Image: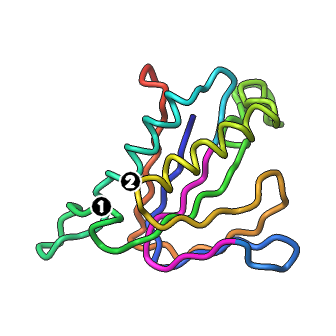
Amino acid sequence: MRLVVQRVSRACVEVDGEIVGEIGQGLAVLVGIAKGDSTKDADYLAAKLVGLRLFSDSQGRMNLSTGEVGGQLLLISQFTLYGDVRKGRRPAFDRAASPDAAKELWEYFVSAVRATGTPVATGRYRAHMVPSLVLDGPVTILVDSDRSI
């Protein structure tokens, strides 16, 4: 599994002109799921995500987690995080999980993050989504459950 984590002052995601997920201060997170990913990967990333210290303390150091600043998370599924453009100009998505397998793990991941008590909003799985983000910093972190990368 792969996450693109961005610190935001606010963010939302629309589907067909309707806002389906919205947060204030917190993290907007794009979530990609690869073939072979498991609940072990989801549990690892859920714990890692809520523990990331990406918010400034009183001395201006990134030393506080989302929960410590009363922040929220906006989770957005995005299979294109596994797009491979090393050959040619059109991305290949061979490493991305099938839609059915990814949906099951996506739902598990969302539940695992919610179980931490951090407020969570989401996009809509497999929908054409239009995210709007107001980046804070900007701060963008890549997190992958594959520790060999």
Look at the picture and state if 17 lies above or below 82: below
Which amino acid, by three-letter code, is at mark 2?
Val
Q: Earlier in the sequence, mark 2 or mark 1?
A: 2
In x, y percent, where is residue 61? 18, 65
Quadrant including the N terminus: top right
Q: Position of residue 86 (x, y in %)?
A: 69, 27
Q: Position of residue 44 (x, y in %)?
A: 43, 35
Q: Residue at x 58, y 51 (%)?
A: 110
Does the magenta stretch mainly form a helix, a strand or a loop?
strand
The residue range painted magenta reads 21-31
What's the residue at 44%, 66% (across, down)? 7
Kindly indicate the quadrant of the structure image that contains residue 70: bottom left
| Mark carried by residue 1 | none
CA–CA distance in space, label 2 to label 1 = 7 Å
Disc 1 residue type?
Ser
Residue 124's image quarter?
A: bottom right
Q: Residue at x 73, y 42 (%)?
A: 79
Secondary structure, mark 1, is strand
Query: Which residue is label 2 attached to?
Result: 50
> Marks 2 and 1: CB-CB under 8 Å?
yes
Residue at the (52%, 36%) spot, across then down: 42
Q: Which residue is mark 1?
A: 65
